[in-house]
Amino acid sequence: MIKKLLVAIDASEAAAGAVAAAEQVALQVNADVVLLHVIEIASFAAADGVHRFQPTSEELRQAGNELLSRTRARMDNDLRVSLLLLEGETAETIISTAKLCDADLIVIGTDSRGRLAHFLLGSTADSVIRRAGCPVLAVRRGVVQLDRVKACSAGVVATRCARSFG
């Protein structure tokens, strides 16, 4: 049975789709939602050593908290939602947080790049899917509605998706 969803968010369109999907799942199965935004400070370091403007850790925290608050404000008021802002390597932080908060399902957006791009660059969603200790619902950009959600005692989620092709 799904009692708690961990939803990993950033400012992307794919993450917005993940939030919408998680909201629908949570409402259908009466689950709690944990919205997680991970600040990965190392990702702002320049690989070539050239000094560039980099946001401070405080600026990143403020932007992360604003993102979490805006996201929560767009969600159904009947949902039980917790907001969580953490620093660390994104995929590892999502996986460890899911374990620590006893999440039954991780919901994450995916940008649906091509196979070559995934091979060369990797993907947070791919890493989470491969390594998570619970089921993961990866939502592509453009998913606008989950028609049905079925939750069984093993925590497996089956869905039918309607896509936006506009």
Image (tube, rainbow, N blue to C red):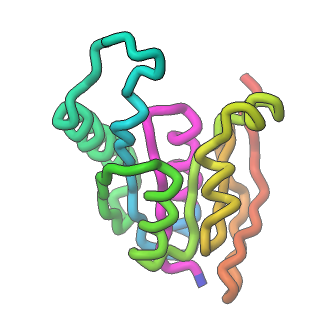
Residue 57 position within the rendered picture, expressed as x and y whole percent measured from the top left: 22, 36
**10 drawn magenta:** yes
List the single residue furthest toward the left: 58
Where 80 sits versus 118, above or below? below
Residue at 40% from the left image edge and 16% from the top image edge:
49
Residue at 56% from the left image edge and 48% from the top image edge:
18
Question: Residue 137 lies in what quarter of the image?
Answer: bottom right
Where 164 sits versus 74, above or below? above
Please indicate whether residue 53 sits to the left or right of residue 1 in the image. left
Q: In the rendered image, which quarter contains the C terminus? A: top right
Residue at 52% from the left image edge and 53% from the top image edge:
91
Please indicate whether residue 148 sits to the left or right of residue 68 in the image. right
List the single residue furthest toward the front: 49
Count the marks.
0
Residue 39 position within the rendered picture, expressed as x and y whole percent measured from the top left: 35, 43
Residue at 32% from the left image edge and 12% from the top image edge:
52
Where 68 sits versus 99, above or below? above
Residue 15 position within the rendered picture, expressed as x and y whole percent measured from the top left: 52, 41
Which residues, given as a range, are shown in magenta?
A: 2-24
Please indicate whether residue 11 sits to the left or right of residue 24 in the image. left
Where 162 sits versus 12, above or below? below
Residue 139 position within the rendered picture, expressed as x and y whole percent measured from the top left: 66, 48
Q: In the rendered image, which quarter contains the N terminus? A: bottom right
List the single residue furthest toward the right: 115
**123 drawn magenta:** no
Question: Residue 157 lies in what quarter of the image?
Answer: bottom right
Please indicate whether residue 55 sits to the left or right of residue 147 in the image. left
